[in-house]
Amino acid sequence: MRCIKCRQPAAVEVRRHHSAFCPEHFIEFFDNQVRRAVHDEKMFSPEDRILVAVSGGKDSLALWDVLLRFGYQATGLHINLGIPGYSDLSQEKTEAFARDRGAELIIVDLEADYGVTVEDFKRGSERTPCSACGLSKRYIFNKVALEQGFDVVATGHNLDDEAATLLGNLIHWQDGYLIRQGPVLPAGYPNLVKKVKPLYRLAEREIAAYAVLRGIDYVLDECPNAVGARSLLYKEALNLIEQHSPGAKQNLYLGFLQKGRKLISAAEERPQLVECERCGMPTTAQVCSFCRLMERVRIRLRRSKPEPVAPPAAR
Amino acid sequence: MKVIVRYPKRQELELKGARRVRDILKELNINPEAVLVIRGDSLVTGDTVVGDDDVIEVRPVMSGGQTDAVH
């Protein structure tokens, strides 16, 4: 297989684009997808201070790497979740990455700073560990960004993550989540910092390839709490479809952003109802549709009937 | 050839005879969408022929977590 740009031996095949690339041109493809995401979704500008949520896995380190290469002001935020045999290694990899690149890194330790670990969530909460972990991370990302004056929080969510989340939200018809799902969650009141996902156009496999080609040393092992997680089931199902129909994940998610979201939000916008000024029934206009219909019909009926002959005048 | 598979647990397999990467994955019942294949320090594509003396790593790319809510 040859690179479609330079005909050198290919390192990565991207079936959904009917393409294959050598290492150099794959990085160019990757960069273009990130630039397009940032530009099209107006995620941030060079003046913005970006807080990058970094777990030590391939996605977040790849995101941090590409933003630093592009010259953005990107500070890392790592949360040590206190997961035995996993969290300390994740922190080490993140610190090594920051050290090698001279990048600024903030560390929050869930146990030291909040007195709990994800292990405690398993025992003391009805949520699944992944759900409690996700909730805690979102809370802390927002809090640190707010307190330290960052303009935006960037996370490494990729096309597979977003397609799997979309599939889950569709299976359960989570209409509230569906309306808000997207690569940008705007800032809001009170105290909600803007969140962006610059890797949403890239598949998980492409991000792993980028990490390998860039020599990024990331945590290879899966989080022990995620074993058997629903997200992995959805991803496997989507990968099976993708294997037989390349581009399926991209069509599902990017199609949702272009078309599906509009349909859902249109359906959700319920017009304000008022009382019809004639009959008092609910309507969105001054006069309800039924009253308007009756009025039109009566006018027409009156016009079509012959004028009644005036009774002869009494003598 | 030696094949190092990392999912669900790290294991080393020995396969006899040269063959293409995509055939190896098929034989191991692994979806090529879910992995990268690395020989030495290089990524290889599905049509690459792997020889008897080669060592390849089949590295999963999936990571899990929460999907039941907006991230």
Image: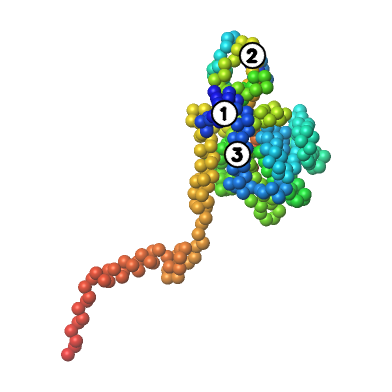
- Classify mark 3: helix, strand or loop: helix
Which image quarter holds the N terminus of chain A?
top right
User: Can marks 2 and 1 be said to lie on one chain?
Assistant: no
Name the kind of residue labelled 1 in the image.
Cys
Residue furthest out toward the bottom: A315
- Picture coordinates of residue A60, whole percent (x, y): 69, 36
**Residue tagged 2:** B54
Name the residue: 66% across, 52% down: A187
- Picture coordinates of residue B40, whole percent (x, y): 67, 19
- Classify mark 2: helix, strand or loop: loop
Compared with A63, A261 (above or below) is below
Q: Nearer the viewer, mark 3 or mark 1?
A: 1
Q: Nearer the viewer, mark 3 or mark 2?
A: 3
Name the kind of residue labelled 3 in the image.
Asn
Q: Residues within 10 Å of mark 3 (few under 14, many from 20)?
A: few
Q: How many numbered tags mark residues here? A: 3
Image side of residue A93 versus residue A273, left or right: right
Mark number, residue A32: 3
Name the residue: 77% across, 49% down: A148
Q: Chain of mark 1?
A: A
- Classify mark 1: helix, strand or loop: loop
**Residue tagged 1:** A6
- Picture coordinates of residue A121, whole percent (x, y): 73, 38
Image side of residue A109 versus residue A285, left or right: right
